[in-house]
């Protein structure tokens, strides 16, 4: 090191600076390429995706009931892993949204039906985001993304700080009143691991809910992803939901 | 299952207005989480006041230097308690330190907290008191207290001029490190909220900065009131140049904090994004009293006017004391309201941006008003013990008082 004179040092530093400057000038040209990111299901098998066809949902809420039964979700009207919203759009521009007991109590006929322009049902649940804000904020890593793309909570590890509930843009999480931990849709992980369908998909009478392996190009969900015009909720959050919707109206949030 | 609590939620169902996502009915962060940034803010603010004397050489603040440090310490010891009491599994709280998740602002807060408590504040208090601790360990006649001081010397009893000089130098370095650490501590609390993109009422890069300046205001006001109160208890004269200077710094901090808050509000109104309708309904409705009246009019504009008068007019000592005390109390109430408006206000509206839920504060429960009051008063009890064990007053003052 002794032989490393000041002159040599300056030369090396100037050289390094030149290389960095050259790189900085050349990168903007190739930066656009970075917008493309290969979806993880091209690399990992299986990788679960979920889709809802809004045009097929009849608001029967059998999915809500099946979910509560299958996953032992508290039967109160403020704890849901999935729920169904009804939208009523009126000629005046007014939008009415309701989801009585998550849809389980049924929907009253709309008042003043003559003013209704359209009405539809939107099932909601965890979006199993590719870039999940809930996972990002968990202080102990109790909520995590599995290899196959499902967001889960480790009930034996969660400290119950509720930060993840605050961070979820979709209101898909709640605080379990008995276990005192965060709770959410597991995509019926215990079922799908055995090759079964999720409870909600299993009972859906119209096929409005769909679930499957995105890494399998022949699966129905892959075809749905490829061929239909799809939307996600709150895309501006950058969470990259893997729950996609067909036929979503602009009023849906 | 806590049936009484479930019953409260069932009642809340009838008070919902508009459409909320069903899981948004329950307010996740209670009054205890209001207390948490409030207490941390007092810590940071008190420390800033201490460093004004130490780092920025505002010698006139000497009478409050040590008091500020002790106030910061007393509040810092309590700061994590409301968080831990609030956890669903308090017994697992330690996991934040043992297995932290590095991308979580909350997890990193634990380390900033530990750094600040262990490295900065405790060290600084110890260095500053070292000479006295050694002296007390020799002269104290009440034996348990003597043993306590003996332990506190950590076996170092060298108080030669040379070693005291080194203490002073180290202390100065620590304060220089401590100042950004104090700001980091509270800035981080702001970041815990400011980084939640799902909540438009919280998600703003200004949040940490607003928190820091309102923290300064609350800490300065807190130390000022405690100083005035202690002078009254000890029957010594209030050092008026010191009080006047604190008043000036308090005014500056409130003005900066208030300007930032208004800037944030202006931006929200002007940009009028998707969430604007629900936010304006929130401010005009559920937060009207706590935000417009208490936080803005009572807690910001009034103290700014009062302390402003103090700068412009030549007033009698008694009036100046009164104005300082009143402004301090108003600022403290205003900043508590600000924390409430951020934490509770941000949970009143659903992420559906179409409706509001309600919050009924329990009285006696774990997260009730009573817990909050106890946790809010606990730092003052700790401070009383600290003041008894480590009196921060100058020697001649102590003699006069006794």
Image (spheres, coloured by chain):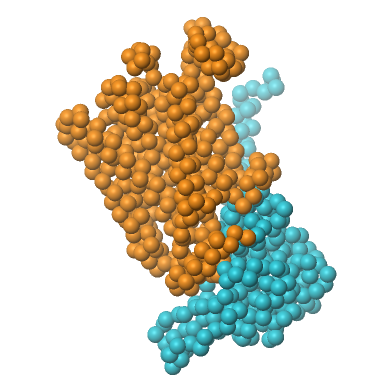
Q: Is residue A233 visible?
A: no
Q: Quadrant of residue B116?
A: top right
Question: Along the line of sight, which residue is nearer the eye, B130 or A12?
Answer: B130
**Chain coloured orange: which letter?**
B
Q: Which x, y percent locates residue A92?
A: 39, 85
Above or below for A133 versus B122: below
Q: Quadrant of residue B115?
A: top right
Above or below for A26 versus B122: below
* Residue positioned 32% across, 51% down in the render: B294
* Residue positioned 54% across, 65% down in the render: B7
How many marks the image carries: the answer is: 0
Question: Along the line of sight, which residue is nearer the eye, B322 or A219?
Answer: B322
Question: Along the line of sight, which residue is nearer the eye, B14 or B355?
Answer: B14
Q: Which x, y percent locates residue B284?
A: 34, 63
Q: Which x, y percent locates residue A221?
A: 73, 77
**Residue most extreme to the bottom:** A114
Where is the N terminus of chain A found, in terms of image quarters?
Answer: top right
Q: Which x, y percent locates residue B107?
A: 61, 45
Along the horizontal axis of the image, is A24 left or right of B311? right
* Residue positioned 24% across, 35% down in the render: B322
Q: Is residue B320 visible?
A: yes
* Residue positioned 46% across, 91% down in the render: A113
Q: Quadrant of residue B332?
A: top left
Q: Tell me the shade of chain A.
A: cyan
**Residue most extreme to the right:** A194
Along the horizontal axis of the image, is A150 left or right of B210? right
Above or below for B73 versus B308: above
**Residue most extreme to the top:** B160
Above or below for A16 versus A50: above
């Amino acid at each position: 090191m002794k032989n490393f004179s000041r002159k040599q040092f300056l030369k090396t530093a100037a050289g390094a600076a030149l290389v960095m400057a050259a790189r900085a000038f050349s990168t903007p040209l190739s930066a656009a390429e970075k917008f493309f990111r290969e979806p993880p299901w091209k690399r990992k098998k299986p990788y679960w995706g979920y889709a809802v066809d809004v045009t097929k949902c009849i608001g029967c809420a059998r999915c809500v009931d099946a979910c509560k039964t299958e996953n032992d979700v508290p039967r109160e009207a403020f704890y849901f892993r999935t729920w169904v919203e009804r939208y009523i759009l009126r000629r005046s521009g007014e939008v009415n949204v309701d989801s009585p007991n998550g849809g389980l109590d049924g929907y009253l006929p709309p008042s003043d039906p003559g003013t209704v322009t359209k009405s539809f049902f939107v099932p909601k649940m965890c979006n199993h985001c590719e870039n999940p804000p809930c996972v990002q904020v968990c202080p102990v890593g109790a909520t995590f993304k599995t290899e196959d793309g499902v967001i889960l909570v480790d009930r034996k590890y969660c400290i119950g700080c509720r930060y993840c509930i605050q961070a979820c843009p979709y209101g898909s999480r709640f605080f379990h009143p008995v276990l005192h931990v965060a709770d959410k849709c597991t995509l019926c992980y215990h079922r799908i691991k055995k090759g079964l369908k999720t409870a909600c998909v299993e009972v859906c009478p119209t096929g409005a809910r769909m679930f499957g392996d995105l890494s399998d190009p022949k699966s129905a969900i892959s075809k749905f992803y490829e061929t239909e015009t799809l939307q996600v909720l709150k895309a501006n959050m950058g969470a990259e939901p893997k729950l996609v919707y067909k036929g979503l109206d602009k009023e849906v949030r | 299952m806590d049936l009484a609590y479930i019953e409260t939620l069932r009642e809340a169902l009838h008070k919902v207005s508009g459409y909320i996502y069903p899981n948004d009915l329950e307010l996740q962060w209670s009054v205890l989480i209001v207390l948490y940034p409030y207490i941390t803010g007092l810590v940071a603010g008190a420390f800033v006041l201490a460093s004004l004397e130490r780092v920025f050489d505002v010698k006139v603040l000497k009478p409050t230097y040590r008091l500020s440090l002790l106030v910061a310490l007393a509040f810092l010891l309590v700061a994590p308690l409301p968080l831990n009491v609030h956890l669903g599994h308090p017994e697992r709280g330690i996991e934040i330190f043992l297995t932290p998740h590095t991308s979580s602002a909350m997890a990193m807060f634990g380390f900033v907290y530990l750094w600040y408590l262990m490295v900065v504040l405790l060290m600084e208090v110890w260095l500053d008191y070292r000479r006295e601790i050694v002296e007390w360990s020799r002269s104290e006649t009440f034996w348990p207290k003597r043993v306590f001081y003996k332990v506190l010397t950590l076996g170092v009893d060298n108080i030669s001029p040379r070693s005291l000089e080194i203490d002073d130098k180290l202390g100065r370095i620590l304060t220089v490190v401590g100042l950004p650490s104090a700001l980091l501590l509270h800035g981080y609390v702001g970041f815990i909220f400011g980084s939640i993109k799902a909540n438009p009422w919280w998600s703003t890069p200004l949040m940490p900065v607003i928190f820091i300046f309102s923290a300064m205001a609350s800490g300065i006001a807190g130390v000022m009131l405690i100083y005035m109160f202690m002078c009254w208890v000890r029957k010594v004269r209030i050092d008026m140049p010191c009080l006047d200077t604190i008043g000036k710094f308090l005014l500056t901090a409130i003005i900066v904090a208030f300007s930032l808050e208004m800037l944030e509000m202006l931006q929200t109104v002007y940009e009028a994004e998707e969430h604007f309708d629900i936010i304006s309904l929130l401010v005009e409705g559920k937060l009207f009293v706590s935000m417009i009246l208490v936080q803005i009019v009572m807690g910001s504009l009034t103290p700014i006017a009062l302390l402003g008068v103090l700068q412009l007019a030549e007033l009698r000592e008694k009036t100046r004391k009164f104005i300082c005390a009143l402004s301090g109390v108003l600022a403290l109430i205003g900043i508590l309201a600000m924390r409430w408006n951020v934490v509770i206000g941000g949970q009143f509206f659903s992420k559906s941006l179409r409706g509001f839920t309600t919050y009924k504060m329990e009285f006696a429960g774990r997260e009730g008003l009573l817990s909050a009051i106890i946790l809010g008063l606990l730092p003052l009890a700790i401070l009383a013990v600290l003041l008894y064990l480590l009196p921060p007053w100058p020697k001649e003052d102590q003699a006069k008082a006794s």
